[in-house]
């Protein structure tokens, strides 16, 4: 992102919005789960269209993932 200033600005703006809405927090201390993420973007003529993709199936230091800890309902059909 350091090589593309427009992408970095759009990414920081998007992550700040997620934090302001309470969808995410910055982890200041080691915790149980950190959800990895990356930016998917498309450069337009005068703008950057950006989506941040979170990967809850990525393994953490304990070997499990956030998805591994979620409750799975029985199949309905």
Image: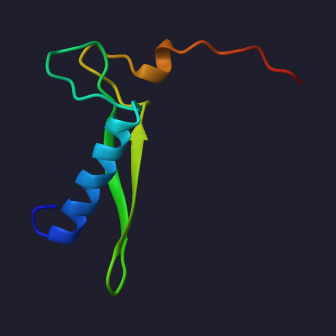
Which residue is nearer to you in this view: 24 or 60?
A: 24
Which residue is nearer to you in this view: 69 or 23?
A: 23
Image quadrant of residue 66? top left
Residue at 40%, 40% (x, y): give it.
54
Q: Report x, y in % for residue 21.
A: 41, 36
Image quadrant of residue 48? bottom left
Residue at 32%, 83% (x, y): give it.
46
Is the C terminus in the top left, top right, bottom left or bottom right quadrant? top right
Left or right for 23, reference 60: right
Q: Report x, y in % for residue 65.
A: 39, 21
Residue at 76%, 14% (x, y): give it.
74
Left or right for 46, reference 28: right
Say if 21 sits above or below 2 in the image.
above
Residue at the extreme bottom of the image, as rendered: 45
Say if 39 sits above or below 35 in the image.
below
Left or right for 15, reference 55: left
Is the N terminus in the top left, top right, bottom left or bottom right quadrant? bottom left
Q: How is the image coloured?
A: rainbow
Residue at the extreme right of the image, as rendered: 77
How many badges with numbers are in the image? Answer: 0
Residue at 29%, 22% (x, y): give it.
60
Say if 12 sits above or below 10 in the image.
above
Say if 29 sits above or below 55 in the image.
above
Q: Report x, y in % for residue 30.
A: 17, 15
Residue at the extreme left of the image, as rendered: 2
């Amino acid at each position: 992102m350091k090589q593309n200033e427009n992408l970095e600005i759009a990414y920081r703006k998007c992550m700040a919005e997620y934090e302001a809405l309470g969808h995410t927090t910055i982890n200041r201390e080691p915790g149980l789960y950190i959800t990895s993420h990356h930016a998917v973007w498309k450069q337009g003529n005068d703008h950057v269209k950006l989506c941040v993709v979170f990967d809850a199936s990525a393994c953490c230091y304990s070997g499990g993932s956030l998805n591994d800890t979620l409750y799975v309902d029985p199949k309905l059909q």
